[in-house]
Structure formats: C-alpha cells, structure tokens
Amino acid sequence: MSDAIRAHFAANRPAFRQYIVELLTELVAQRTVNAGKARLDECPGQEVPGEETRVVDVLKPYLEALDIPYEVHALHPRRANIIATLGSGGQAMAVGVHSDIVPPGDGWATDPYVVTEKDGMLLGRGVLDDKGPIACAMAAMKLLVECGVQLNGRLQLAAIASEEYHEQGEPDPGIHYLLEHTTWKPDFAIIPDIGENMKGIDIAEKGRSEIHVTAHGKQAHGSTPDRGINAVYKAAQLITLIEGTTLPHTVHPILGKPSINLGLIHGGAASNIVPGECGFTLDVRYVPGMSAEGVAEHIRGLAAQVADDFEIRVGHDAPPHAIDADNPLVHAVQRCAEPVLGFVPQPFGMGGGTFAKAFNLGGIPAVGWGPGDDEAFHVVDEYVPVEQLVDFAECLALLAMDLLGTR
C-alpha cells in the first residue's frame, strides 16, 4: 500500500506543493502574534494575544472540502484549538502544531505576513514555526483521502494555541487545557517544531525553571553611600558566585549537563540613590535527577556566603522528559523517513521545550521531528525549504499508515 501512496504522491507532487504553499499563504496572513498583554500595542489588529481562532477559521473549509471531521475547543473564544480526525477506531496519532507566532521584529526584506518564495525557500513569519507543518499535515491527510486509504486508527491534526508565550498567573488555553479539560488523549504525537532538517528526532528535553532572587539593602542618598547598603553590590557578589558554580547533577546520556543563565536584572530607582533592592531571574535548564527546588537550594547556599537576607524562590517550572531511543515511535519515524529522504534521522536531546514535553509528562509518547533549519526559528526573514515541506507531508502520511495500520 505504501508503494502505491508514494507513486501517487510522486505523480502529483507539483499539485501537493501548490496546495501546501496556498494553504500556508493563508495561514501566514493571519496575525496570531503571541507575546503577552503588555506587548499588544506591537500587534496591530489583535484584541488579545495569539488570536489563534483565526487559524482555526482558515482550516475549517479545507477540512470540510476533504470531508474530515473536526472539533473546536476553546477556553477563550479568540484562542481556539482545532482537532481534525481522519479515520476511526483504533489508536490515534496526533501531529501537534502551534498556531501562534512570535512578533516579526524589524528588518525584514519582505512583508512578514506575505509568503514569498526565493531560491527554493519560503519566507514569512510562521512558515517554519509552526504554520508550515500545519500545511504539511493537511497535505498528508489530503494524500490519504485521495488514495482511499482506510486507516486502522486515527490521524489527527491538532492546531494548538499558546506555545510561544504564557501569561503568568493565567490558565493555558492550549495544550494543558486540551489534555486536562477535554477527553482528547492521542496514543502517539509528532511535534514538528525542532528544525534539524528532519535529520534529528527529539526524544528528550531539559527541564526549565526560573529562579527569582531578591537582594535587600538599605536606601540612602547617593552622596553618602556609607549610610546605606547597596543591594546591587550584594546581588553582584552573588552573581559572581553563580557564574562560577556547577550545579550538582549526573550527566544524562542524551541531555548532558544543566545550564544556568542570568536573563533579567533590575535594581535602583535613580543614579543618586543607594539602591535598597535588586532582583534578578535565572533561567535554569536541568536534567533528569535534578529538581527546581534542588537548584534553588544550591543558590541559597551560595547566597549565604554573601548575606543571610536574600529571597530566593522558584517561579515557572517545567520538568525534564525523555523517552527511550528504542521506543516504537522512534523506529517508525526512521522507517518512514529513509525511503523519502535518503537518510535515517537520529535521536537527540535539546535544552528548549516543545509540546512533546506536555504529551510525554502526560503519558503520551511524543517526539519532535520536522522540517527546516533550527537556526531559522524566531529570526528576521524566517525561512523554510519548500521541498522539505513537501517531503514532510509524504512522510507524515507514511508514518500514519505505519503506526496505525490500514484495513
């Protein structure tokens, strides 16, 4: 059956290419910028961050044209998720993609909301991250429908809200809402949000924690600094210790060692005032065997070498996850990729996070695998090779048949 699918795809490759580009053009035109409420002024025409319902509205007629049923789930009416299902019964393989984008930024050679083709590349905000893969999944479904394939299970396209940014203190309208407040629970998930030009399969991701540190001093006039205690100086002493520290850990075979980065710092009210407070935030990427609270305790030990009144607390925290390189999902990806791409993708781990984390921590085997260059994410003139999108669509169709079987 797979040989017939591949033959049909090869004979109609230009038509599938056009289908992907046309759908992607419509998707990129939708301004679904998600950078938080504080930056809404940078998002002309948007009333809320994300507004991923715009993507849902684009996909509906495409799905209806193929007679593919879908469900819309929305915690917020302008931030909807859509799950389209091809097939019935059996197990479900989801392609989990996010429908929000980061702000375009300045310096684009083209209009970031208009797909432009140049030298075999498609340019535009979201062509790779992550609207290109949405179009690929739709093309994979179209291929299976055209060939009359009856899956012994369900291929699902899940276009999910709110991956790029989460508003602190507010419920997630995307993946966590779907997995925790609906009945949707696929058996496998492919997350095409890693780049690597389809050569890598993301099987493990480090945990990420924000550690918030506050140094306390005593405010005084800038002309008499001896009458105060400079909180910035105290923070600087601790930062020097943090820069030279090694977090306690056991090297992970895939993820390696943890990392720590000072990402934010703020202190002082004016240059002629001795600052009474200074705060900074650490971004910590940690490996299995570690915990956010364990990292915070290590920082507290360093702080005690400077003063005994630092405040140190854990903010955002997402634990690490990993699946075995011999997981059947990994092998299925490798089997289906090789005849199309001419190489076998290899497992690896990464410090960043994708939807794969939520799936795996929720008991659903998931891997990251998809098209594009990992250096093309979040950059000006975001790009993706158009032929990679076409190849990925074929791979997804073959993978659905491999994992789910056919009748």
Image (cartoon, rainbow, N blue to C red):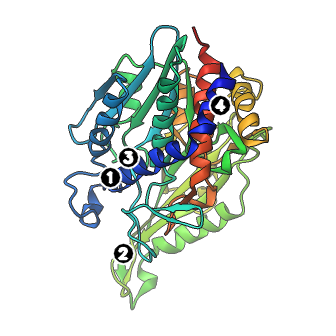
Label 3 packing within 10 angstroms: few (<14), some (14-19), many (20+): some
| Residue receiving disc 2 | 219
The residue type indicated by label 3 comes to His
Going from the N terminus, do you reach mark 2 or mark 3 first? 3
**Label 2 to label 3, Cα distance in Å?**
35 Å
Q: Which part of the image, by quadrant, shows the C terminus?
A: top right
The residue type indicated by label 2 comes to Gln
Mark 4 element type: helix
The residue type indicated by label 1 comes to Thr
Going from the N terminus, do you reach mark 1 or mark 4 first? 4
**Label 4 to label 3, Cα distance in Å?**
40 Å
| Residue receiving disc 1 | 32
Q: Please name whichever residue, 389 or 260, is drawn nearer the observer in this view of the structure.
A: 389
| Residue receiving disc 3 | 166
The residue type indicated by label 4 comes to Arg
The mark lying in front, picked from 1 and 2, is 1
**Residue appearing at x 36%, y 49% in the figure:** 27
**Residue appearing at x 65%, y 44% in the figure:** 286
Going from the N terminus, do you reach mark 2 or mark 4 first? 4
Residue sticking out furthest to the bottom = 223
Q: Which mark is residue 6?
A: 4
